[in-house]
Image: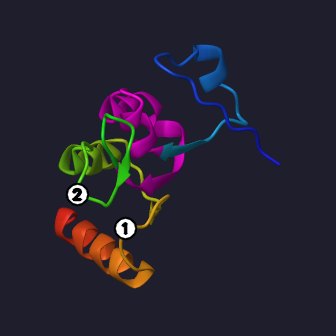
Amino acid sequence: MRLGILFQNFWPEQALNHPGLAVNYDSSNLTRRGLDAIKGVADLGPWIIHTHAKDGLRTGEEVALGKGNVDWNAYIAALSAADYDGFLTVEREKLTESPDTEAKHAAEFLKNIMR
């Protein structure tokens, strides 16, 4: 079992230097709470071991990839700058289309962004 902690607006140095800390980074959750998801990647890059490909609005709503306020070009660039080499795992909390349609849209969106 692992412990996950969300630090909002600060990253305590003593916590970041603990060998048991790893980050599952979710750009949408941060964006939906009014935080800077791109700056967070720069701050937490060495500890990010997984990330969700999920979009959201600053109003709090989760939306399909490319329909929200996450700057995907900047997000991918920040992950690359942090030497992140893991998966971008598509996550949807509330489907607005069929699962197949949502999955196809997400795959196409990410392929286009990562070219």
Alpha carbons under labels 2 and 1: distance apart = 14 Å
Q: Is residue 50 magenta?
A: yes
Q: What residue type is labelled 1?
A: Thr
Where residue 105 is drawn, which disc sits there? Answer: none
Q: What residue type is labelled 2?
A: Gly
Mark 1 residue crowding within 10 angstroms, few (<14) / some (14–19) / many (20+): few
Q: Name the residue under label 2.
A: 66
Q: Residue 51: where, in percent of width, then height?
A: 47, 52
Q: Do the residues labelled 2 and 1 touch (CB within 8 Å)?
A: no
Where residue 96 is drawn, which disc sits there? Answer: 1
Left or right: 17 with respect to 70? Answer: right
Q: Residue at x 25, y 48 (%)?
A: 68
Residue 41 in view, yes or no? no
Mark 2 residue crowding within 10 angstroms, few (<14) / some (14–19) / many (20+): some
Which of 3 and 69 lies nearest the eye of the viewer? 69
Q: Which residue is drawn at 54% across and 39% down?
A: 47
The quadrant in which the C terminus is found is bottom left
Q: Does the magenta stretch include residue 31?
A: yes
Which of 35 and 73 lies nearest the eye of the viewer? 35
Asked which secondary structure carries label 2, the reply is: loop
Asked which secondary structure carries label 1, the reply is: loop
Q: Which of marks 2 and 1 is in front?
A: 1
Left or right: 34 with respect to 15? Answer: left
Span shown in magenta: 26-55
Residue 31 in view, yes or no? yes
Q: Residue 63: where, in percent of width, then height?
A: 34, 55
Quick one: label 2 or label 1, which is nearer the N terminus? 2
Q: Residue 82: where, in percent of width, then height?
A: 37, 42
Using the image, determine if residue 110 lies above or below residue 54.
below
Q: Indicate the quadrant where residue 78 lies.
A: top left
Using the image, determine if residue 98 lies above or below residue 95.
below
Instruction: Count every numbered label the image shows and give the total.
Output: 2
